Amino acid sequence: MSMVKLVNIRKSFGDLEVLKGVNLEIEAGEVVCILGASGSGKSTMLRCLNHLERISSGEIYIEGELTDKRENNKDMMRIDPHKVQQMCAELGMVFQNFNLFPHLTVLENITISPLIVKKVDKKEIEKKAFDLLEMVGLSDKAKEYPSRLSGGQQQRVAIARALAMEPKIMMFDEPTSALDPELVGEVLATMRKLAEEGMTMMVVTHEIGFAREVADRVIFMDGGVICEQGTPEEVILNPKEDRTKSFLNKIL
Amino acid sequence: MLNETQLWAIFDGTVVTIEIALVAIVFGVLFGVIVALGRISKNRIANALSWFYIWFFRGTPLLLQLFMIFYAIPIIYLDATGNTLLIDPMLCAFIAFSLNSTAYLAEIIRAAIESIDNGQMEAAKALGMSYRQAMMKIIIPQTYKRMVAPVGNELILLLKDTSLVSTIALFDLLRTTKTMASSTGSWIYYIYAAVIYLFLTTVIQVVFDKMEKKLGVYER
């Protein structure tokens, strides 16, 4: 059973069709990097998974369970808000702009959702939060507010925050695009660590080097469809499609 | 100078003024949050009701609202039931000022909520929070600092507007001093009133400035 299964996903914003029939299956433990020019629909695809955007038509399965089914922008199944919340908790998401909660300390950022959504014990989750902070190398920042951290540190806190919900899949939406070049490495290192631990990951990125080293599969999207996919060697080193070639030529 | 009776009268008037302003700001904020949430809600009925509320209470004079509650309701009640209704003027003032300030504060609160980056709501939802949890724990707490200055402004306006209650048989600070001025022919009482108003608004200004600094600790 695949972790994620997308069946003929379409998404329009008004007259603009951003996703034009995407089919995709991701297995447990797989690290999938999604490449493509801006506007190719890669971020939208991730955002549809946790209902930040609703698909116009198609079906989405998470761990074999149907989580969204729509046609012509109309629900074809009952959408239970509680179910959506549960599903979101299983899908960790890391945003381009971190989106840490500025009024909460680093520790509170990590613990708030487990505390109020999963209602876990406070002592337990704080211990876990410290473990996560250690993993991302920020044990000494627990009591700081996000505004005191660098972009790279903020993004690592955001990763720890998502992990605190014990998600089965981690989605990264251009996690290093808003960072100064010298801060990109620390975030990628954290993501690499996560991949080595066997986390199922979907990573929208422009970091070709990271995709080459870490990805099990690379997907190239163009014009709202998956244009080419395969191992990093196949897609990055020996692309078959002209569109993939011209994209790689532009960014390498 | 003031004799003891006058001093107490001015004191009582000042208390009336302060009480009405405080009651109005407290209820205004509480109900204002509800009306603001209605305004940004996707629920059409909640949205329309809140819109109508703000439209009415911002669009008619506070004095008119005060008259409606103090004079019109007892007459309507008399016509409908045949019984007379005595409403405590202080209660009328509390109600009218609270209803009115709710409308203004709802707009202040709505603007503050809408000024919070959309990414905050997205992050909260992606972490599994419900809309209500995201609002209560993430969005609204971030509006506090942004609301302090306009709420302080509203409180100062309210404090001065309380002078309208002289029209419904209440003796607030201004009416008390005006009565003294006209019975003695001395303008000095207006100076006393001005000094007390200035003292009160200064206190509000200082307290709200402190609050704004305190609520902003998480900003760099």
Image (cartoon, coloured by chain):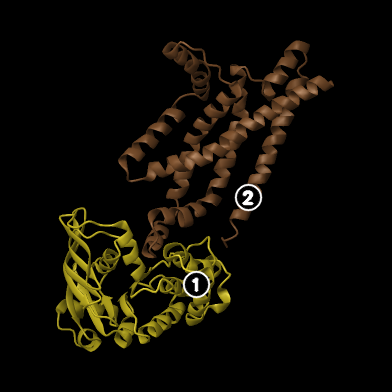
Chain colours: A yellow, B brown
Residue at screen point 25% across, 59% down: A54
Residue A5 image point, x, y percent: 20, 72
Residue at screen point 39% across, 74% down: A166
Q: Which mark is residue A167?
A: none
Residue at screen point 42% across, 44% down: B37
Q: Closest to the observer: A218 or A106?
A: A106
Residue B101 image point, x, y percent: 52, 34
Q: Quadrant of the N terminus of chain B?
A: top right
Q: Does residue B2 appear in this view? A: no
Q: Closest to the observer: A94 or A80?
A: A80
Tag 1: amino acid: Ile
Q: Which residue is mark 1?
A: A125
Residue A73 image point, x, y percent: 18, 54
Image position of A177 with respect to A193: above or below: above
Q: In screen coordinates, is A147 left or right of A44?
A: right
> Does the residue at mark 1 contact the one at mark 2 (Cβ under 8 Å)?
no
Q: Secondary structure at mark 1?
A: helix
Please count the marks in the image.
2
Q: In screen coordinates, is A163 left or right of A105?
A: left
Q: Chain of mark 1?
A: A
Tag 2: amino acid: Met
Q: Residues within 10 Å of mark 1 (few under 14, many from 20)?
A: many
Q: Quadrant of the C terminus of chain B?
A: bottom right
Q: Secondary structure at mark 2?
A: helix
Task: Give the CA distance from mark 1 to mark 2.
Answer: 32 Å
Q: Chain of mark 2?
A: B
Q: Say which quarter of the image contains residue A97.
A: bottom left
Q: Nearer the viewer, mark 1 or mark 2?
A: 1
Q: Say which quarter of the image contains residue A245.
A: bottom left
Q: Which residue is mark 2?
A: B211
Residue A6 image point, x, y percent: 19, 70
